[in-house]
Every structure is written in structure tokens, then in C-alpha cells.
Amino acid sequence: MVYRKLYFIFIIIYISVSVKAQQRVVDSLLSELERHPQEDTNRSSLLNMIALQYSRVNVEKGIAYSHQAIELAQRIRLRDISPAYLVAGACYTAAGQDSIAIQMYQQALSIAEREGNTRTIGGVSYSMGILYYNRSEHYQALKYQQKALDVFKKNKDLDSRMMIDAALNSMGITYMALSEYSRALNYFHEGIKFAEQYQDYDALVSIQQNIGLIYKRMENFPRALEYYKKALLHYEKTGDQYRLAGSLSNIAAIHDGLGNHEKALRAYREALKIYQALGDPRLIANSLVNIGITYLNLDDVVALEYLNEALKLHHIPDDKYMHGVILLQIANVYSNAAPAVLAQDGITVKQAYNKALLYLEKALPLIREAGSLDEEENIWETFSKIYERQHDYGKALHAYKNAVSLRDSARSSDKKHEILKKEMEFEFEKKEAVAKAENEKRHALSAAEIKRQRIIRNTSIIGGIALIIVGGIIVMLYKVNRDADEHKREADFRSLVSETEMKALRAQMNPHFIFNSLNSINDYIARHDTDTATLYTTKFARLMRIVLENSEHREVSLADDLKALELYMQLEALRMGKKMQYDIVIDPEIDPEHTMVPPLLLQPFVENAIWHGLVHKKEGGHITITIGQQDGMLYCSVQDNGIGRKQSEVINAGKTAPGKKSLGMKITGERIQIINRVKNAQAEVRFEDLEEGTQVLVKLPLEKSN
């Protein structure tokens, strides 16, 4: 007999890397901690990072370091210590101590809301949603997942926007656990759009794999296997061990559903080895349950050994769903074991049936509370079969009716059609968008051609009439038109020269910056620091692509320009080899997506702040970029806490060749002059020396896209 299988979905909160790579990161952070004995915010941040990394390789040490971070933050009277409590919650979650994890998350949420720290609010809400999902408290999970999604959508920073697809994915998973497949697909499809928009291929594969799970639950095994195999290839390339094991489990479940039990056992055992190496008790228990169910499908009572072992490992009583599933499968072993096999253990068939009924009675309230219609249906089917074998036909009929009722609710043909409809709508929406864009392009070309023909026709008629009426008027009009055309061409030429100059000026940073970046990549490779080399190369490629794209436009959106500026600062921080923090503060009245600015106008000031101000500081370097508006003008401020202009001039005296000093600043000044000339504006740049560092204020005309 083939039983419907339990499928496990894993949401990874943090970036997944190999255990060895994770340990290298821990060792590097521990060395940095030794070099920084001062009790300050930097040491507090290091303790948090160490705890977070340890949560994946040695959870006990992770918990210990998280408490050190909290205690240090309290001693130095750190105002916002919510990140420390968030990390502690993650460590306790990894240890399976959900109750303590909830306390830590709630403490973090309370502090973050008090301090207005939206990033931490989003992170805590997302983590709590995952925790409550693992406890099978699905409606509580949805509450926090929705809160996280709202925060991520509201925040303007890149990190929050890239978390939107993760939040959508987690909500889809939760609705899937509630057997609400149509709503789950809505969230999955929206998540795919965000993942494609931000080129987050890991998230894209994860969401597609979850769509495969829906097909598996609807018993469309070939379509589900198609999704799973693509995911397996992806995770083999990326080396993500957690998700690789999850893909192996998914594929094994399909083989088991198709009756290929030996193939299923091989894949499940591969997944179990990975989870044992990672030391995650919850996932080890999940794999043992899967193996036990597969042996059950082979009518092998060895299934009981795996299920009992899983029951011992699964020491988290709050996870009602998993607890109930294990009890259900143990009941299936007793109810389907051959009499000869039972006799070997001194158990009669009657005793086996009674044992099975006891396990089912324990499993039913747990599964009901978890809200899984599929597994509750399985419980009632097993009840019905046992009662029928005991010749208690009244109870057998009652149990069978309950199973049928649940089956109609969970997997009706209407639901299958609705899912197919959603898939078709999604594919049609994508095709419709492409067709619409092509149609608009054709329409624009047609309209331009019609307009051109109309102008030619009208000009010909007017010219002919004028020629017939007065020859002298023709000559005069010709001269006037010639002069007007000459003026227009001259104006167009000046504008073209200005635009060309601006493109050339934007390209000035490329040779110098590319040379230094390539040197940095080469240095990381020479030091065998391939992880940092890969990270640097990825960010560098993204920045170059943005610069090339933006160079085609005279103006770009403020959001795109700040994205490039963030990437530039991240790369420079890597090159400096030390911590550099930055903030980007945008006036809520400003819409970054529709506010237009000259590309990379602020970059020379940021570069100047880094390499003339912050590079000479041993620690605590910080840049604040503020965007505001007033009286139709856009105000952009770049403020650093570096050594200041006077001290920088003393340090750099004689180091810069004549004619090269402050080239980027000179270029920016010329760009400001061009803006004022073309737009008849009063743009300007002002410098202000602060007690610590320098502030540059750039005033531009406020331009918005149509």
C-alpha cells in the first residue's frame, strides 16, 4: 500500500553556505574580537555576528555569545539593543528551544518598535513567522509574516526590498500547510515577480520548488518532479547544503509516491547524512520519519525503529503537526504488519490494532490543532480500516464519512481547476505584458510616421500656395525658416555637446575605479580568499552594469542612483579592509522611483569622504547621505565623520600630481554649471567643515518623471 507522504519545506533565514566556510567566517570574527577588547558598539556588533554564525555550526556557543552581546549592550547603555535579542532568538530557534526564542524575539520587537528601528521590526516579524510555522501555529505565523511583508514593502532600502520575495514565499508555504492552495499560489507568483525583479535566483528556485510541492500534493507527480530536479541542480552548484538536502527529500517523496521505494530510500539517506553533518535535530527527525514511511510502504516493520527514533529526537512538543504525523505513521505500522511478524515480538493482531487505535487517538487532536486537512483525512482512513477489520462496521462507516468529507474539502476537482486557472493567468499575464510593450512600440512608430507624413503634406500645400501667390514671400519665409532651423540646429548641437560632455565626465571614474577594483580582486585571489573575491566580483559587476545603463540617460531615478551609490560604498568598504557604516535618509515626501537626478553626481563627494576623510580613521567611519526637498529644489547632503579637509590637506600635501588634484570635484562643478545653463536653474555645491568631518550640500532643481 502506498501512503501519502509528508513533505518538508525549509525556510533559511540567513545566507546558506557550507559548514567549512561558515567556520572560516567564525574564526575570522573571533580574531577580530581579540584585536578589539574595548567595550563599545563595535565589540557588541562582533559578538552578535559571531553568535549568528555559530547558530549554524555550534548552537551552544551561539547562545553563549548572544548573551555576551546582550550583557555588553546593557553595560554600555546601548539605546537600541534589539539586534542582540534578535540574534539570541535565532540561536534558541536553531537549538529547538522555541519558548525562549519567542521571549527573545518579543523583547527585540518591543525595543525596535520603541526606537523606530524598522529593519529589526521586519527581521523579527519574519523570524517569528518561521518559528510559529515550525510550531504548526499557522494563523499566528501568518500574522507575523504579514507584518514583516508590510514593513519590507514600506522600507526603501535595498535589503528590505530583496526580503519581500522571502516573506511572500513564507506566507505561501503557510497557506499551503493549511491546504489553501489557491491563496498559496497567489503569494508564490507574486514572490516570483519580486525574485525576478531583483535577480534573486536562490529565492526564485525556492518558490518554484514550493509550487512543485502543490503539484505533488495534487498527485501530479511528473510536474512536481520537473520542479524538484531543477532545484537540485541549482543547489548542487551553489553548495547550499540545507536546501540541497531538502531537494533530495522532495525527489525521494516523488519516487515513493510512484512506487520506486528503493530510489526513495537512497535519496532520503543522502538527505539524512547532510542533516546529521549539520547537526540539526529537527531535520534529522524529519528524515527519519520519511525513511520510516518508505519502509512502511514496503510493508517492512523496520519502519517502527525509524519512527520511534524520530519520536525521541523530536523533543519539541509545540510542533503539533510533526508529533501527530509520527504517531499516525506508528499506528500505520501496527495496523498493517503481518501477523507472523507481530508474533515475533509477542504481539497478537488484536493487540496491534488496539495499539494503533491508541496512537491515532493521540494524533488526531494534534493534527486538528495544526490545521492539516490532509493528515486528518489520513487518520480517519486508518481508523476506518482498523474498525472494519475489527468488524465494528458502525464506527468504520463514521470514520470513512469523515475521511471523505475532508478529502472533498482538501482536494476537490474545483481546487484542481482553480490551480490550473491560476497558472494560466500567471503565464498569460507575462505574455500579455510582452505583447502590450510590443504593441505600444508599434503604435508609437505608426503615430510618428503619420505625424511626419502630415507635416510633409501640409508643408507642401502651404509651400505651393505661397509659391503661386507671392514669390517674394517664399523667399522671405525661406530665409526666416533657414535662420530658425539654423538656430534650432545650433541649440540642439549645444545640448548634444552638453550631454556628450556629461557622459564623458561620468566615464572619468571608470579607468581609475576599475583598475583599483581589479587589483583588489587579484589581491583576494592571491590570498586564497575566494569567498571575498566572489562577493567583490559580484558587487563590482552589478555596479558596472548600473553605470553602463545609467550612462545612456541624461537623468535617472533617485532610487537607481542611490542603488549604484550603495554598491560603490560597499566595494570601497571591502577595499579598505575595515568597517565603514553608512545611512541613507530620504524625506518621506520624496518618491525615489519618480524623482530624476543626474547619474553619479554624488559619487565624487562620497569618494572624497572615504579616501580623504575616513581612510585615516582607525575605526568608526560613518557616512550619512540625506535627501530632502524645499521650494522646488532637491537637497542632497553627504556628511562624514572623517579627519576633515584641513588635516587631509596636510597629510596629502605633495602626494597628488599637479593638474590631477580633486579632478572628480572639478568635474562635478562643471556638471552643475551645465545643469544651470540647460535648465536655467540655481544649482550649487557648498562645503562645510564640521567639528568632526565634513559636510557637502548639493542643491539641484527638483525633477520628476512623467
Image: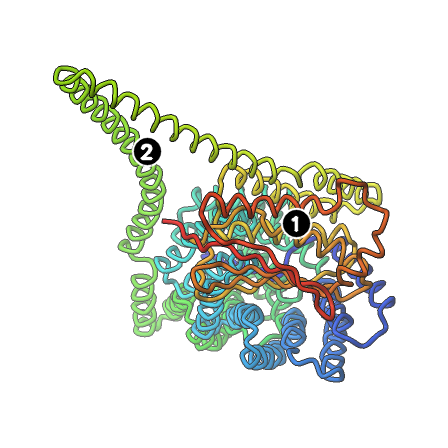
Viewer-nearest residue: 378 or 575: 575
Question: Residue beneath label 2, please?
Answer: 441
Residue 440, compared with residue 640, is above or below; it is above
Q: Please, what secondary structure does the residue beneath circle 1 have?
A: helix
Residue 577 located left or right of residue 417: right
Question: Residue beneath label 1, please?
Answer: 604
Residue 342 placed where, x, y %?
A: 57, 65
Residue occupying the point 43% across, 29% down: 490
Residue occupying the point 52% across, 53% down: 683
Q: Please, what secondary structure does the residue beneath circle 2 have?
A: helix
Residue 447 located left or right of residue 64: left
**Is label 1 or label 2 in front?**
1
Residue 288 appearing in the image: no
User: How is the protein colored in the picture?
Assistant: rainbow
Residue 485 appearing in the image: yes
Residue occupying the point 35% across, 26% down: 483
Q: Quadrant of residue 97?
A: bottom right
Viewer-nearest residue: 101 or 339: 101
Mark 1: amino acid: Pro
Residue occupying the point 23% across, 22% down: 456
Viewer-nearest residue: 572 or 217: 572
Residue 405, compared with residue 562, is above or below; it is below
For label 1, count other residues whose C-alpha is less than 10 Å away and answer few (under 14), some (14-19) or many (20+): some
Tell me whether the residue at label 1 lies in contact with that at label 2, contact meaning CB atoms closer than 8 angstroms: no
CA gap between label 1 and label 2 equals 37 Å
Residue 292, compared with residue 247, is above or below; it is below
Query: Which callout, 1 or 2, points at the residue further toward the start of the chain?
Result: 2
For label 2, count other residues whose C-alpha is less than 10 Å away and answer few (under 14), some (14-19) or many (20+): few
